[in-house]
Amino acid sequence: MLRADPHPQAPPRNPGETWFDHALVALSLLLLLGGFGTVIEGNDWRVTTMLVALMTGATCALLRSLGFRFVAPVALLVEFLALAWIFVPETLLAIVPTGQTFTALVDLGRSAREIIVDDRAPVGAASPIVLTVAASFGLIVIVADVLLQTRRAAPLVGVLLMAVFVTPALISGETPSLWSFLAVAALWLVLLRSRTSSTGLSRRGVGPALVLGAGALAAAVAFPVVSPDVSAVAASWGRPPPAVFGRDINPMLELGQNLRRNSSSQALTYTTTADTAQYLKVATLRDFNGKTWRPAEFGRFDRLEGQLPINNDIEVEQVRTTISIKGLRSPMLPVPYPALPIVRGLKGEWTFQNPGLTLRSRQDDSRGETYSVESLEVVPTAEQMRAIETTIGPQLDRYIELPEKLPKIIRDTAREVTADADNDYDRARALQSYLRSTGGFRYSETAPAAEDYDGNGMKVIAKFLEVKAGYCVHFSSAMAVMARSLDMPARIAVGYAPGSVIGDRNGTTEYEATSDNLHAWTEIYFQGVGWTRFDPTTNVGSSTGFEEPAAAVPESDDEEAPAPTPRDRSQDNVPTSTPAPEARESETAPRTALTTMGALLVLGAAPWLVRVARRRWRVSRGRASVEPLWRELEDVARDLGVPVSAADTPRGFAARLRQRDGVDLDALERLLRRVEATRYARDTRPDGDGTADLVAVAASLRAGASTRERLRATLLPRSLAGRSPVRTIGEPGTLAT
C-alpha cells in the first residue's frame, strides 16, 4: 500500500515538465473559454481574455522553471499591470500604475456588477464585462499554478476545470457542449498520467488511478444524456429581463443596459383618441448632481402639476389612451403627459406622483393591467410660445440647478447654438435641432458603452458633445443641461417612444411599444403652457414644433409629425459624414494583442536581459579580481546543464568541466590556477586578468553543447535560480548528495 505523505508539496519537477503541465492547463482553459459564448456576445473579448491568461500563465511557468519561490504574488502583479495597460491606459504614468488606475479598475468592476445584476445573458462585450472575464481567467491560471505544486495536483486541477466548465451553463441555462468536455477531459487524463508517472507511483498504483479517471469521464459523458437541460441558477445573468422601472432603481442608469439587450420583447400595446402616437412617461428625473440624474421627489415649494394654470388663449384638447401591459413588470405605469387624475380599470392601489404626474404603487406591479387614462394635449402656436417669459421662483429653482464646475464645452455649445434666438422657445428649438439633425450627431447604443461613457454626468455629456455619438440618455441629458445653462427650467422624462402601428382595434389604430422603444427625452417649462416635450435624439420619435404663422417658412431640418415606426437597430453603428470614433469593442482585441505580445516579449526576454547584465558586470569586475570570472564560469556551466554545487572546490568543478566535449583545457587550467592562487596564496597576484580565458572556456562549452541546450541556456538560464546540489557521487572535489 502507498503510505500517506505528511508533506502536501509535490516533488520538484524539471523545467520541461513544468512547461508541459502549464501548457495542458492553458489548452484546457482555451477550450473552456468557448463555452462562455452563451454568456457574452462577440469574439474580441475572447482574444483579450486569452492573452491576459497567456501572460499570467507564462509568468507562472517561467518563474517555476527558474525555481523562483514567490510565484503567485508576481503573477498577480503581472495580471494587474496587463489589465491596467489594456483597460485604463490613460491612468498610467508612462507604464506605471497610479492611484487613479486602481480607482478606474474598481469603477469598471462596479459597472460590471450592475450589468451582471440587471442584464440577461448573453450580454454585450462592454469593457466592464470583458475586464471581469479576463481578470477571472487570469486568477484561474494562478490558482491552477498553485495546485500544480501539490501532490494531488491532477484531482484538484480537475475540480477547477469542472467548475469553469459548468459556470456558463449555470448562468445562461444552456447545456454545455459535449465535445468541449471530452477534449478537456482528455487533456486532464494526460495530466493525470503525467503526474502519476512522475510522482513515484508504482504501476499497481497507476492502473487504479487511470481506471478511476476513465470511469469518471464515462459517467460525466453519460450525465447530460440522461439528465434534463441545465437551468440557469445564477442569481444574476440567468434571470428574466431586468426591470428598468423597478423599485428604488434610477431608470436613467438602467436604460442603456436594457436598450442593448439582444432580443426585443413586447412591453405594452395602446390605442388613443389623439391624432398622433403617444409618448408614454414612466418616471421624471429632476435632480442633477453632476454625475447622474435622479428621480424627482415632492419638495416644499413644488406645486401639483395638474393644478398649474394654462393660458386661456391656448388650445387644449382632452384625449383618452387605453393601455394594455404585456411584458412590463414594474411598480410604475406608463401614462401620457400631462395626465388627468381620471384612470379607469386599474387593479390595486395606484397614486399619481408629483413632480411629473406619473403613476406609482407601493405594493402592486404592472403585470396584466389594462387601463384608460385621460390626458391633455396642449397645442399653442409658435407665436404664443415665443411671447412667453418664464419667471424663475422657488418652484422652479430646482430645475435650473447645475454643478459649479460645468465643462466649458457644454456652456459654450449652448450659447453658440442659440446665439440667434431671443426667446426660450426658439432656444429650445435650436438645441433640439442641433442635437437631432444639424449638429451631425449619430445614434449609437454600443459605442458609448464600449468607450466607457455609458452614463449621463457632466464629463459624459462633454465627451458626447465632442464625439457626437450616443443614444437617448446622452441626447436628453445634453439638452437638459444646456437648457439649464441658459436659465431655462429643464428635466428629463423616461418611458416609451411612440412605438409602431400593429393593427386596428374597434376602428382605432393600435400601437405597440417594445423594449426597443425605451426612451428618454427632455421637458422644458413654459409659463402658462406647462412642461413641454422636446425630443433631441436623432432618428427616434419626433421633434417638437408648433404651428407657425402662414407667411413663415417652416424649418426643413426638423420633422413635424411623429414617426411611430420601429427603431432600426441595424443602423445604430453606421457612420455618417461626421467622423466618430469606432466602438472600443472593435479595438479591444488588436490593442490587447499588441499590449500582451509586447509584454510577453519583455517577459520572455527578461531572463536573458538579467543574465547579460550580470555577465557584463562580472567581466568588468574581473579585471581587478578573478572571483567574479569564476562565478560567471560556474553560471555558464549550470545554464548548459552541468551540475554545480556550493560544496565544490575550484579543482573539483574544473574536473567536472573537463568531461565535457570540446572544452578549452588550456584556458580552463590557466583560469583555475589564477583562482587557486588568489584564494590560497593571497600574497601572490597573477599578472593581467583572466577575462580572455573565461571567454575562451565559455565559448568552448557552448560549442560543445547541443542546439537545444544553448537555446535553453539563453532563454531560461538555470543560474538565475541559484545553485543546486550535485546529484552524482564520487566525482573529485564534490560532496555526495
Image (spheres, rainbow, N blue to C red):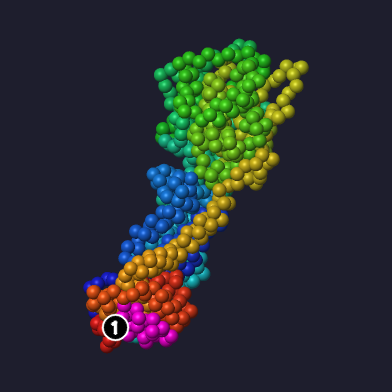
Instruction: State whether residue 456 is above or below residue 604.
Output: above
| Residue 639 visible, this orientation | no
Q: What main secondary structure does the magenta stretch of the protein show? A: helix
Indicate the quadrant containing the N terminus: top left, top right, bottom left or bottom right.
Answer: bottom left
Indicate the quadrant containing the C terminus: top left, top right, bottom left or bottom right.
Answer: bottom left
| Residue at image point 60% right, 42% down | 444
| Residue at image point 31% right, 76% down | 686
Residue 599 percent location from the top left of the image: 47, 59
Span colored in magenta: 654-674
Residue 469 percent location from the top left of the image: 60, 39
| Residue at image point 57% right, 51% down | 587
| Residue at the extreme top | 312
Q: Is residue 303 left or right of residue 264?
A: left
Q: Helix, strand, or loop for circle 1?
A: helix
| Residue at image point 45% right, 65% down | 604
Of 655 and 321, which appears nearest the observer?
655
Q: Name the residue under label 1.
A: 652
Residue 661 percent location from the top left of the image: 42, 86
User: Residue 643 sits in which quadrant?
Assistant: bottom left
Instruction: State whether residue 536 is above or below residue 701.
Output: above
Instruction: State whether residue 167 is above or below residue 483.
Output: below
